[in-house]
Image (cartoon, helix red, strand yellow):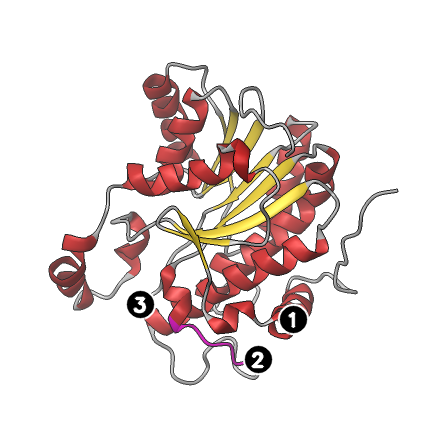
Amino acid sequence: MTAWDIRGKTVLVTGATSGIGLEASVALAGLGARVLMVGRDRARTAAAAAAVASRAGTSEPSSLVCDFSSQAAIRALAQDVRARVDRLDVLVNNAGGVNKSRRLTVDGIEATFAVNHLGYFLLTHLLLDLLVKSAPARIVTVASVAHRRGTLDFDDLSFERGYSLLRAYSRSKLANVLFAAELARRLEGTGVTSNSLHPGSVDTNIWTGAPLWAKPLIQVLFRPFFIKAELGAARVVQLVTRPDLADVTGQYFEDGARVDPAPLARDESLARRLWDTSARMVGLAPPPAFSVPA
């Protein structure tokens, strides 16, 4: 088992201004990690970093800004990270959202897929050599049980036909699980692990993008099953900090336990096709093939 202690390690958390990302940042800072918090709005991210310092009783985490609907912004974020740190021990891919109607990003990609999946794919690729250099290191991708309802239609990834909020969200979460597993296979032997999880049904700001008619329905039907953001964050922190998970990679967790994901999420040929397609969509050609450094 690889030795692991989160104290002093550098952890990058995306989607850190509220909900799971914020609570995970508080917990990790309190455990002695050096936390870098990423948010979409500069003022909100700075305020969140100050709140983490106050609640955790630590120095203020670094705050970085990125709109994950823009590939140029993700590339700028990666440059910013490199300018601030010379090692990266943990990457928590947590930023995400939903959209009540179909819309395209500045890069011409359906926004839910772009933010929730391609954002993770591109940022991870841009920071991967830093993670490998810092090994042992961990990549934790926040997915969802919704992946079990997801499908992948490579002829219509952007839902030009039949868009719905839940179909788009479920597809992006299926992509998360496939990506995390394929990444683990490609990183075998590097000392960098890659796992994904459903942290629980958390009542977070992600649902502000739901249509007005759906919000009362969400409150009535799902609120009794929602858990506190602190508990969802604790399940993320578990994957970041537990020493007995140091050599566990390519796995999916639900509600704190390791379980099998949906059959589609275990399809390695589908994962490879998604990888190659994602690489083309973010302008990485040929598709990156990670290998063990000499």
Q: Is mark 2 on a helix, strand or loop?
A: loop
Q: Indicate whether residue 153 is drawn in magenta.
A: yes
Q: Do residues under tags 1 and 3 come within 8 Å of each other at their CB atoms?
A: no
Residue 148: give x, y in percent of width and height.
40, 69
In this rendered view, identify the residue nearer to me: 70 or 38: 38
Q: Indicate whether residue 126 is drawn in magenta.
A: no
Residue 185: give x, y in percent of width and height.
68, 57
Quickly name the residue at label 1: 277
Q: In the image, is 104 to the left or to the right of 209?
A: right
> Which residue extends farthest right?
294
Magenta stretch bounds: 149-154
Pointer 3: residues within 10 angstroms few (<14), some, or many (20+)?
some
Q: Residue at image x 59%, y 49%?
A: 249
Q: Residue at image x 80%, y 47%?
A: 292
Type of the residue with mark 2:
Phe
Q: Where does the C terminus fall, quadrant-wise? A: top right
Quickly name the residue at label 2: 154
Residue 100: give x, y in percent of width and height.
31, 67
Residue 55: give x, y in percent of width and height.
32, 20
Quickly name the residue at label 3: 100
Counting residues from the N terminus, which is met first, the one under dot 2 or under dot 1? Answer: 2
User: With respect to residue 82, does 269 lie above or below?
Assistant: below
In this rendered view, identify the residue nearer to me: 184 or 117: 184
Q: In the image, is 206 to the left or to the right of 294?
A: left
In this rendered view, identify the residue nearer to me: 142 or 169: 142
